[in-house]
Image (tube, grey):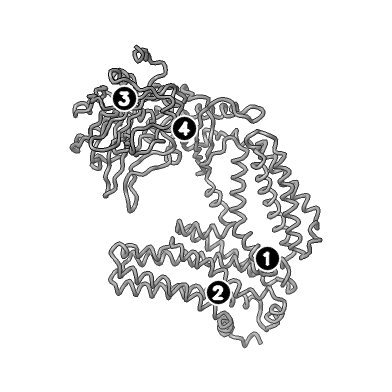
Amino acid sequence: MTSRSSFFKLMWEDLRQRLWTIVLAFVVFVLPVPIIIAMMVTSDDSSVRDLPQMLQAQNVWFVIVTVTGALICAVSGFGYLFSKKKVDFFHALPVKRTRSFLIRYLNGVLIYLVPYLVMLLVSFLIIAVSGNFDTEVLCTAMQGFVVHFLGYLIVYTTFILCVVAAGNLVVFFAVSGWCFGITAITVYLYNAFESAFFDTYSYYSDVYSRLHALRFLSPGYFYVNTVIHPETSMLLQELLCTAILFAVALLLYRIRPSEGAGKAIAFPELKPVFRVSAVVLSGSCIGLLFYYMADSYREGQLPGWMIFGTILGVLLGHMFIESVYHYDIRKCFAHKLSMFVCTAVSVTFVLLMRYDVVGYDRYLPDRKKLASVAIDVTGLDGYGNILKYVEQKDDKGIENISKIHEMSLTEIETVYPYLETLVKDTEEYWDSTRKVHGNWLTVEVAYRLKNGKTVYRMYRSAGLREEVLAPVYESPEYKQCQYAGVYTIPAETLQTVTAKYAMNQIAMRMSLEEKEELLEILQREVGRLTLEEKTKNVPVASLTMSVVIASRRSTVDVPLYASYTETLQFLEARGFSTEKNYEWTGDETMSLFWNYSGEDTNSVEGYYSDDGSFRMTGGSNYDADYNREGLEVKPEDWQAVYELCDWEALWDYGYTSMGKEYHRVVLDIPVPGYNSYERYIFRLDKNADLSFLFD
């Protein structure tokens, strides 16, 4: 009788039947990690410092063991539901289904929990004997244990839910894939549709924020997210989600019909859920594939091929699902109404995206809803990233940071007119046939709303639009982000400061007071730099600040414009000059290339030296383009040509180089004692008077 059946006795009997699972759990837990730790404590000091990493939450081995263990324990404990004979046998026992569920569930938890704890104890013992046990090791290990144990619970419970819902092992794997992958597939597919159809789609668009918002629908993502960011709030949400899944699994287990064993899906009511979602996704995926295969995204055609691919994908997906449900290919066209509904939904979705019914490209938040904005005009100030001094919990140094993520322009009234212009320009960027006209700029924008949401867009701009961009560019918030290195570097971390103009370069070591003075001057003059000077003039020199922090060496480059009078005077007082004075030896080689087309100057064999010059190896021959177009300048004309040039390295600092036509001058200076050359590249205005070359 049930009243005489001991709960723990039944647990013991169930564990005996799962002995191989227990042995496997001890093998994968107790052997690998303690052995590796024992090897580490007998190695050098660097290995000992890495001990906490072996037990931390981010250890990939624990993630693999947790997910695999959850799968094995779920199938070994509840896999009998796939066999009619076993279902009849176990359900005939005088044990209530609720009790049977709890026994099998708890045993699956113990099979994971006990080996994990034994592994931790053995690891702690090995570390303690070696004299390296401390609070860091303990706290890191316990945090990892909590993260992986809660992760095991949510993954394990999800797998059990899949076992209960499925009727056989093959379909179980399919249902498990659906449960763990449906959210990610949907999010990434929607992201692909945005990229295909929306003109203002930005590749900064945060897919992970959408996954995070839908984390309750994806147990796998929930677990992985807590591994990466083990925050208490996330762990509590994960535990709540596990409790809900447990209640659903228990309910389905109690009402699961015995005749469900051996069928595709044990509950007929769940069939439409899996069918519709899988068929719509398959139709959308194949439709998008046809869209790109037909080059519709290039030619601006109507999405006819995509609609055809969508319908084909729906038909194939529906036929496959129905064949699996009925174990009969002749039933592939069963539930025709469902097939038509899936087709209509998929095609409607395609058309809604294609014609932007939701107004994605017209999106412009109300200024009252904006907390801040970030903008990145391609080519205006580099390409996407900035250098900034960052202090973190365990580290500090110069980091390469995405500008669009770092910038925060809070003066909304200043930036809003520019945003309105971008929206209007983008609407005019495409003509009625979807073909691009004009050579316009790309502008990345991040809208940070007051509700905490961030929206990314990529706009097209007909030129710089100086009348509305200038107030934004010249604002302190923009400058402090764009030139974050100048504003954030501590003076005491500066080792050397190198002023450069082609061959005229000087490295300076300064006192702390001089470094502080230089940074203050730079901050003032960077703050006064106007958009007009930035875009109309080439820098007269560049400044490279070498920063050393905790043995980490970094460099920050700053272009120097003619308006930086204080900075230039400061440098000139220490020996640097922007005048184009060079003592020619006669061994140099200077070549002029007319109407340079923008070919890569680095196609010759060589490398860049520390001073920024290109050092050639293997001789002085130019590539084919140079040999075909180059004009060798006579030595008596070298200085005259040099004075007309701008050092090309300075053109890389901004918008001045975009869309400009120029001649290119290549100067090779032999390196004494070596069969190599230092190469300096200059740009020469196309309208410069060069008649003296032919006198």
Query: For numbered disc 1, what is the local secondary structure?
Result: helix
Mark 4 vs mark 2: in front: 4
Quadrant housing residue 298: top right
Cα gap from disc 4 to disc 2, whole angstroms: 55 Å
Q: Amino acid at mark 3?
A: Val
Which residue is label 1 attached to?
171
Q: Where's residue 649, x and y in %?
A: 35, 30
Q: Determine which of the numbered discs, if any, sits on residue 378 in the image.
A: 4
Pointer 1 and pointer 2: residues touching (CB < 8 Å)? no
Q: Upstream in the sequence, badge 3 or badge 2?
A: 2
What is the x, y in percent for residue 38? 35, 72
Secondary structure at numbered mark 4: loop
Evaluate if marks 4 and 3 touch, with contact meaning CB atoms under 8 Å apart. no
Q: Which quadrant: the C terminus?
A: top left
Label at residue 108: 2
Task: Work out whether 67 lies above or below 207.
Answer: below
For marks 3 and 2, give the CA distance: 71 Å
> Reading the chain from its start, which is encountered first: label 4 or label 2?
2
Q: Nearer the viewer, mark 3 or mark 2?
A: 3
Q: Nearer the viewer, residue 675 or 590?
A: 675
**What's the residue at 29%, 28% (across, down)?**
501
Q: Can you say which quadrant of the picture contains the N terminus? A: bottom right
Numbered circles on residues, count:
4
- Depth check, mark 4 against mark 3: the one in front is 3
Q: In what element is the residue under mark 2?
A: helix
- Cβ–Cβ below 8 Å for labels 3 and 1? no
Residue corresponding to mark 3: 540
Task: Please tell me how crowded label 4 is: few (under 14), some (14-19), or many (20+) other residues with Cα within 10 Å.
Answer: some
Q: Residues within 10 Å of mark 3 (few under 14, many from 20)?
A: some
Q: Earlier in the sequence, mark 4 or mark 1?
A: 1
Q: Secondary structure at mark 3?
A: loop
CA distance for labels 4 and 3: 22 Å
